[in-house]
Amino acid sequence: MNCRILHELPGRLRVHVKQCSMTIDEADILETYLKSISGVTEARVYERTADAVIRFTADDANRDDVIRALAAFDYDGVQIDL
């Protein structure tokens, strides 16, 4: 997935997903996927702005895991029941 980090604090990332528009179903899929990442404590996805706020335990390993998981995410490649 192509995304850009908009804001970062220790234990928190706000990213913008680079896509034309995001449906509610896509936002739900992405949010569920983000919540399943090890170390993530909270995730919210906003379909209107195509932004996601991710809270995780604050250490460099978890930050790298979150970024790797975002890079590997694909709507078609993930199996999530809503």
Image (tube, rainbow, N blue to C red):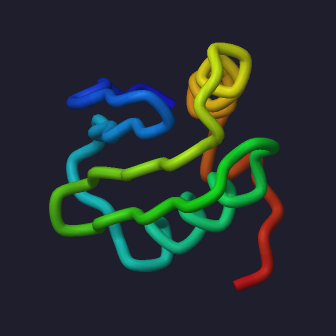
- In this figure, what is the number of numbered marks? 0
Residue at 64 percent across and 22 percent down: it is: 59
Task: Tell me if residue 60 comes above or below residue 77 in the rendering.
Answer: above
Give whichever of 61, 77 is nearer the camera: 61
Task: Tell me if residue 31 comes above or below residue 71 in the rendering.
Answer: below
Q: Position of residue 39 (x, y in %)?
A: 75, 43
Give whichever of 30, 14 is nearer the camera: 14
Give whichever of 77, 33 is nearer the camera: 33
Residue at 51 percent across and 60 percent down: it is: 43
Viewport quadrant of the C terminus: bottom right
Q: Position of residue 46 (x, y in %)?
A: 29, 66
Give whichever of 49, 39 is nearer the camera: 39
> Quick one: which residue is furthest to the bottom in this view?
82
Q: Residue 17: which quarter of the image?
A: top left
> Quick one: which residue is furthest to the left in this view?
49
Q: Position of residue 30 (x, y in %)?
A: 55, 58
Q: Residue 63: which quarter of the image?
A: top right
Q: Position of residue 9 (x, y in %)?
A: 34, 30
Residue at 28 percent across and 51 percent down: it is: 51
Residue 24 in the figure: left or right of residue 6: right
Task: Tell me if residue 62 comes above or below residue 43 in the rendering.
Answer: above
